[in-house]
Image (spheres, rainbow, N blue to C red):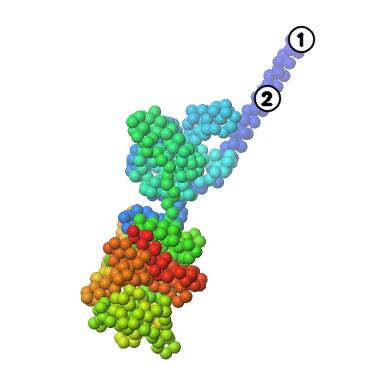
Amino acid sequence: MQKNANRKNQKQTRSFKSRVIGFFVNLSLILVAITGLYVLFVFLQMPSLDSVLHETREPAIIFLDRNGREIRADGRIMGAAVSVDNLPPHVWQSIVAIEDKRFFEHGAISYRGTIRAVVLNLFRGHFAAGGSTITQQTAKNIFLSREKKMSRKIQELILSMWLEDRFSKNQILDLYMNRISLVGGMRGIDAAANTLFGHGAREMSLAESAQIAAMLKAPSAYSPLKNPERNIKRARVVLTEMVKQKYITIDQARIAASELKPSGEIQNKNIYRYWTDFVRDEIESRLGEINQDLYVYTTLDAKLQKRVATSVSDNIGEYQGAVVAIARDGAILSMLGGDDYRVSQFNRALALRQPGSAFKPVVYLVALENGMTPESYVNDSPFSIGDYNPKNYDERYYGGINLATAFAKSVNSVPLKLTKEYGIDAVLKMAARLGVGNNLKREYSTVLGASEMSLLDLTTIYSVIWNDGQSVHPYSITKITDAGGHTIYSRNPSDELTILQPQTVEYMKELLYEVVTKGTGKRAYTPDVFGGKTGTSNDNRDAWFVGATPNYVMGVWVGRDDNKPMSSKITGGTLPAIIFHDVVK
């Protein structure tokens, strides 16, 4: 009996154990099935694995200055594509050394790194280290999602394994370097290098590479711009790791460490916005709809543009200012449409305003062509024609004076008398020859600058004079290429036409020189200034100065956007002449 009872108990025990084991086996199978279904569901929610590598975006326009350096990009979210093959080795080595030193040895996941990170985080009681490989980080950057959800982590793992299966290690590293976001929402180490150091990733030194690699842990916290001390400290760690992994020698690390420095201020690309808006209109007028990435080689002199922006900002006060500089051949070297593009996108260099006395050279050119010289005598006295009886600026009259003195002192009666003698049509025809006759009224007030024109047009008039009387057609683009470097547009300059005879030009230059040495434009003078002319419209609403140097003709305008009068102290010979002087000196 006892034996039968024991056997029954043993059978029941085994049966119970079997049921328990069976329960857990079944539970495990169910959990595996559920997990498998969940992973399958998450996988099905992923975008096409091929599509994640090819982003759809609007075409980008990259604007370059006259030396081929990038000044700004419209619509670009990524820097230029770089790869292990076209970068200095220390660029990608610094990244591998600090982010994933066994990158070339493990697969999608580094189990050693993951275990080390878990242990370190448990020991410290908070999240202190991550175990993500470069492949995992690449997957994360491709998805561009920072959601801390299980589904996203599973997708990241799936994509990491797919990347490792489909691409070589170098290709994965290329993807990582081109997708990592470090500065201002743009992606790629080339974008970061351009922003922080003023040149592309291919030109980075060892020190700069270490500073970029130092940012990868936390771009904002380790930025050489925002937190230079933390960046430099971590960059030294990067260099140390590169030595340990035999990428560089101790001497190379020491030299690079001595070159670590805070990044300068982010280049203020707002100073180029008026210019690039102007150039973009020119692109669209030539090419029509833009459906591919373009590299636009412009005529802008970036150094001159910075000087212009600084001078305007330093001197403008409560008013607005605009500047245009044109080379002898018509290349626009500088264009600033206002003090701050962020406040107003209106380009004042293209606005129509009254040029005042800055228009007078057109009248004097007519007189010079008709046989007068700078020494010819004229009479400065009150003049009226019909109801029109303008006075001199200070209501002072000089009587018998020569043409040079009348021009230098910018008296009003003389150009009016010259117009009466030679005819208003002769003045308008001269303006048309110089390239700016479209908006001029057939009125005597036009002679004193009452008809509106833009600063660009006014500067063009003076450019013809300093181009020895040859025609000038301002231009902004020399070449446009696609992303592959194939030329889409190349400027084909037209032949110059003779607008003014040599003797007329020489006399006009003499008059303009008198203005900056003895007349109203003395504040603009430096030894490099060939001459210039001031202009002030009625009630001091607009103040102008246009002058010439060996390299360019520059026009400056100062005024208010609402066209209200400025202080009576503001004339073409004050703020505009001072801005011109500051730029030139």
Residue 465 seen from this side: no
Residue extending furthest bottom? Answer: 386
Q: What amino acid type should be assigned to the residue bearing mark 2?
A: Val
- Residue 190 lies left or right of residue 529; in this view the side is right
The residue at the point 37 percent across, 54 percent down is 70
Measuring 40% from the left and 88% from the top, which residue is drawn there?
385
Residue with the mark numbered 2: 20
Amino acid at pointer 1: Gln
Q: Residue at position x 30%, y 64% from top?
A: 529
Residue 104 drawn at (x, y percent)? 40, 33
Say which element carries label 2: helix
Indicate left or right for 499 with 152 as reference. left
Say above or below: 42 vs 457: above
Query: Which x, y percent locates residue 13?
Result: 71, 18
Residue 149 seen: yes
Q: Which quadrant of the figure has residue 413? A: bottom left
Nearer-the-camera pick, 277 or 441: 441
Towards the viewer: 54 or 221 = 221
Q: Give the x, y percent position of residue 439.
A: 40, 78
Element type where label 1 sits in the image? helix
Front-most of 298 and 26? 298
Give residue 150's quadrant in the image. top right
Q: How many marks?
A: 2
User: Disc 1 designates what residue?
Assistant: 2
For the C terminus, the image quarter is: bottom left
Residue pictured at 47% horizontal, 42% vertical:
223
Q: How far separated are the C-alphas under marks 2 and 1?
A: 27 Å
Residue lying furthest left in this view?
A: 502
Count neighbours of disc 2 (C-alpha within 10 A) and say few if under 14, some if 14 to 19, many if 20 or more: few
